[in-house]
Amino acid sequence: MSSHLPVPELLRGTLDAMILRTLDRGPSHGYAIARAIERASRGDLLIEEGSLYPALHRLLKRGDLSAEWRITETGRRARYYSLSAQGISHLADELRLWAKVSAAVSRVLAPGPARTDGPAPGGLAEIYGAFTKATLAAAGSEAPREVPA
């Protein structure tokens, strides 16, 4: 398994968007939501209870989620969360915003003008290319032929 990325240092609201996207696939309890995010990130993101449950409560209070108590597959009582109509709308907004923000950050992180002595092996151009390919692959898109300026 990969080393985990520091979720608290992610952009504010990213955890909310990941929770909404996870619940877009169907109702779930907190532990299962955290594990689904971990699986979807291929083990890079570990959502701690201290981050997850405050986010779930915030989303409930905001009206993006509804919740009900049910029995889990292991026979335990757990609170299951579902997207509300408002949550579906908010998720669509968050996905549009994420596309804009991630594209903007990618442009900022893109390599600048060519160096006179050429790029260093393993330098930004190579890292950016790998990042772009991985990001597009995760989104189900093809890599662009040229890096945008």
Image: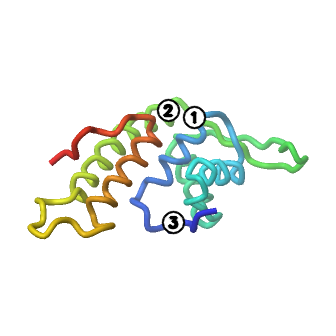
- Residue 114 percent across, percent down from the top left: 12, 60
Taking the spot 33% from the left edge, 67% from the top edge, the residue there is 122
Q: CA distance from mark 3 to mark 2?
A: 27 Å
Q: Which amino acid is tagged 3?
A: Leu
Asked if the residues shown at circle 2 and circle 1 are in contact, with their CB atoms under 8 angstroms apart, the answer is: yes
Q: Position of residue 135 (x, y in %)?
A: 41, 47
Tag nearer the camera, 3 or 1: 3
Visual colour scheme:
rainbow
| Disc nearest the viewer among 3 and 2 | 3
Comes first in the chain, label 3 or label 1: 3
| Circle 3/circle 2 CB separation < 8 Å | no
Number of residues whose C-alpha sits closer than 10 Å to that of mark 1, classed few (under 14), some (14–19) or many (20 or more): some
- For disc 3, the neighbor class at 10 Å (few under 14, some 14 to 19, many from 20) is some
Task: Label 3, secondary structure: give it.
Answer: loop
List the residue tagged with mark 1.
24
> Which tag, 3 or 2, sits closer to the chain's start?
3
Disc 2 versus disc 1: distance between alpha carbons? 7 Å
x and y percentages locating residue 51 in the rendered image: 57, 63
Residue highlighted by disc 3: 5
Secondary structure at badge 1 equals loop
Secondary structure under the numbered disc 2 in the rendered image? helix
Residue at mark 2: 88
Give the label, 2 or 1, closer to the camera.
1
Residue in the picture at 27% in, 54% down: 105
Relative horizontal placement of residue 18, taking residue 119 as reference (left or right): right
- Residue type at mark 2? Ile
At 43% across and 62% down in the image, what residue appears? 10
